[in-house]
Amino acid sequence: MNEKTLSRDEFIGLRVKILECTDPTWIGQSGLIIDETKNTFLIEIKNRKKIIAKKTAKFEFIINSEKISITGEKIVFRPEDRIKKIR
Amino acid sequence: MTKKTINKKNQKQIALKRIQGLFELASNKATDDNFELADRYTHIARKISMKYLVPIPNEYKRCFCKHCYCYLLPDVNSRFRIKNGKIIIFCKNCKKYTRIPFKNKK
């Protein structure tokens, strides 16, 4: 799987780790994605729900024992729009 | 000029895969008593189905109410009965009935 096929796929239910962020308290945290809007992710970390903006961070996913990292600015779309609009 | 968008056949394949995954997640959340997230996942699945013109598979069509679109779990927020050759579904949220006819195959 490369970066583009993952950006078109479903994010809800995947584990994510945050590599870079403009807010330094978020760096290195990991959790489970529960919901998604146009600009944000809703992540569950240690039984707490937190919202992070997509633009500010870089995310890392582990799929089939491969590490794929995606910058947030490229996936700023609604979940139903992402199949068509990712270039 | 090279094409950058993917063609329609691939779009429909990806959409079908996402709809199936979303309904599986919704059933897990509903059995864990979290109906808000289950409703939200069916909402996203319906939107994907409408946007890319992909029909929802038959086994998932009876999992949500036809009137209020909430996720149905038998005996928690719905009642399933059979009478006169029809399946009758009663949704406790919107208090409406849905009737689906079936035929005995021999």
Image (cartoon, rainbow, N blue to C red):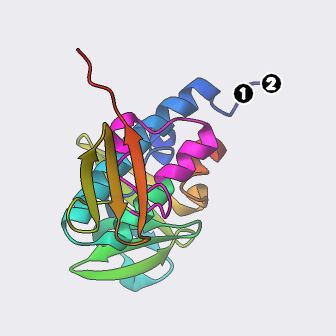
Quadrant for the N terminus of chain B in the image:
top right
Disc 1 crowd rating (10 Å Cα; few below 14, some 14-19, many 20+) is few
Q: In the rendered image, which residue does mark 1 sit on?
A: B3
Q: Which residues are magenta?
A: B45-70
In the shown orientation, is residue B105 left or right of residue B68?
left
Residue beneath the point at 54% across and 73% down: A56
| Residues at marks 1 and 2, CA–CA distance in whole angstroms | 7 Å
Quadrant for the C terminus of chain B in the image:
top left
In the shown orientation, is residue B65 left or right of residue B78?
right
In the shown orientation, is residue B89 left or right of residue A22?
left
What's the mark number on residue A14? Answer: none
Residue A87 visible in this rendered orientation of the protein: no
Residue beneath the point at 59% across and 59% down: A78
Labelled pair 1, 2 in contact (Cβ < 8 Å): yes
What's the mark number on residue B1? Answer: 2
Query: Residue A48 or B25: which is nearer the viewer?
Result: B25
Residue beneath the point at 56% across and 52% down: B47
For residue B24, above or below residue B95: above
What amino acid type should be assigned to the residue bearing mark 1?
Answer: Lys
Chain where mark 2 sits: B
